[in-house]
Image (cartoon, grey):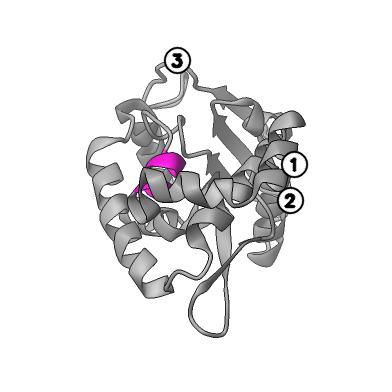
């Protein structure tokens, strides 16, 4: 008989593992609210076009460019480390983080698949002990400063499936059994592709799945 396939538990972050959004608060910490607004105002055409099209990916790109462009990677990293510790201490949902821990206890591979920003999310991933963090990262130039461009685009919607599939192929488990957890429209594709789907918005989930001891 063939062995059971490996199991991958893929968790969205903002609203799924946390009680609130993390992106805007982090941008505020890096640039200040006035700095964030000023950076967006300097891109009037791009911002207006993104809003008119209700294109969340383009709005995100404008905000990231406004805050990250030209900033020193080490300086942002220090802010990200502090922010990650605060999130891990105060903003995590008890129910979904308990489910994440259950997957780890079962020996499953656990991965964060999120549009949240890598400047802090990689550290959160380390604190949670996950196997990988697939998220929205920002390009670093040869001078050690951010260019302001997103690396590979915003990790949302179909991009989540692409990133997860690429990671599974890299570690040679393309046929894994996937459990997926999300809370928004940006997670629809991820949830639809999973064998076990959990939409956790306004729903408290048990630490252990029903029927599993």
Report the side of 168 relative to 97 (left or right).
right
Q: Is residue 148 above or below residue 13?
A: below
Crowd rating for badge 3 (residues with CA inside 10 Å; few <14, some 14–19, many 20+): few
Callout 2: SS? helix
Q: Which mark is residue 162?
A: 2
- Estimate the x, y position of residue 59 in percent, counting from the top left: 64, 41
Above or below for 184 versus 179? above
Residue named by callout 3: 203
Contact flag, marks 2 and 1 (Cβ < 8 Å): yes
Marks 3 and 1, the one that precedes in the sequence? 1
Nearest the eye: 148 or 178 = 148
At 58% across and 35% down in the image, what residue appears? 180
User: How far is the residue under mark 3 from the one under mark 2?
Assistant: 27 Å
- Is 7 magenta? The answer is no
Magenta stretch: give its range.
22-28
Q: Secondary structure at mark 3?
A: loop
Instruction: Please report the residue visible at 52 percent of the width from the left and 52 percent of the height from the top.
Output: 39
Under circle 1, the secondary element is helix
Image quarter for residue 207?
top left
Q: Is residue 64 visible?
A: yes
Q: Which residue is mark 1?
A: 158
Please name whichever residue, 53 or 9, is drawn nearer the observer in this view of the structure.
53
């Amino acid at each position: 008989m063939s062995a059971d396939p490996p199991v991958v538990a893929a968790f969205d972050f903002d609203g799924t593992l946390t009680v609130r959004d993390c992106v805007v608060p982090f941008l505020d910490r890096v640039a200040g609210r006035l700095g964030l607004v000023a950076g967006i105002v300097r891109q009037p055409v791009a911002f207006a076009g993104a809003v008119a099209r209700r294109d969340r990916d383009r709005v995100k790109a404008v905000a990231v460019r406004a805050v990250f462009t030209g900033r020193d990677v080490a300086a942002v990293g220090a802010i990200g480390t502090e922010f990650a510790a605060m999130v891990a201490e105060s903003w995590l949902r008890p129910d979904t983080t308990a489910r994440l821990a259950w997957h780890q206890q079962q020996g499953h591979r656990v991965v964060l698949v999120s549009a949240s920003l890598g400047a802090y999310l990689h550290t959160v991933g380390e604190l949670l002990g996950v196997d990988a963090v697939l998220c929205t990262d920002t390009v670093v130039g040869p001078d050690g400063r951010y260019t302001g461009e997103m690396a590979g685009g915003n990790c949302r919607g179909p991009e989540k499936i692409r990133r997860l599939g690429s990671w599974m192929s890299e570690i040679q488990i393309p046929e894994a059994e996937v459990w997926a957890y999300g809370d928004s429209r940006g997670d629809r594709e991820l949830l639809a592709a999973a064998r076990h789907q959990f939409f956790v918005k306004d729903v408290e989930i048990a630490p252990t799945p029903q029927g599993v001891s």
